[in-house]
Image: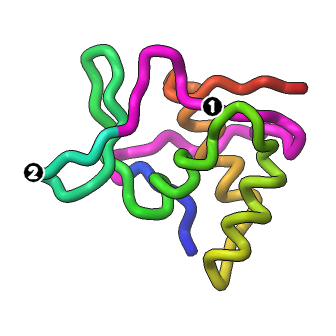
Amino acid sequence: MPADGATAGSPPTSPDTVPAGARPRLGRHVRMHFDRARERQVLLGPESVIVLNATGADILRLCDGRRTVAAIEAELQERYDRVVDDEVRGFLTRLAARHCVEIDDG
């Protein structure tokens, strides 16, 4: 299961990925919305739209600020045959760099 949920050009994963104990949530000025024209979930931010694939949308639905990254990965592993933890963390790291996801480290 590829966890790179953003379909538009994502920057490469940084070596400083989100730690397993972090608690991600959507950024304050970002919301996830189903776009009927695209028939996909999108992230809407100030003057930006990020089109998500199904996997990316599933990851972000679990980012509630209460679950840790490790718990999100475990839940995804129950849903899908193959979940690569590094890909989930890389996806969240890229969205955090774009201020779409906020990370609570503890």
Q: Which residue is mark 2?
A: 37
Q: Along the line of sight, which residue is nearer the eye, 13 or 76?
A: 76
**Residue 7 versus residue 14: which sits nearer the camera?**
7
Q: Which label was assigned to residue 9?
A: none
**Residue placed under numbered mark 1 in the picture:** 25
The way the protein has been coloured in the rendering is: rainbow
* Disc 2 secondary structure class: loop
- For numbered disc 1, what is the local secondary structure? strand
Residue at mark 2 to residue at mark 1: CA–CA distance = 26 Å
Q: Is residue 8 magenta?
A: yes
In depth, the one of 21 and 90 nearer the eye is 21
State yes or no: residue 98 in magenta.
Answer: no
- For the N terminus, the image quarter is bottom right
**Residue flagged by tag 2: what amino acid is it?**
Ala
Query: Which residue type does callout 1 highlight?
Result: Arg
Q: Position of residue 75 (x, y in %)?
A: 72, 64
> Which numbered disc flags the more N-terminal residue, 2 or 1?
1
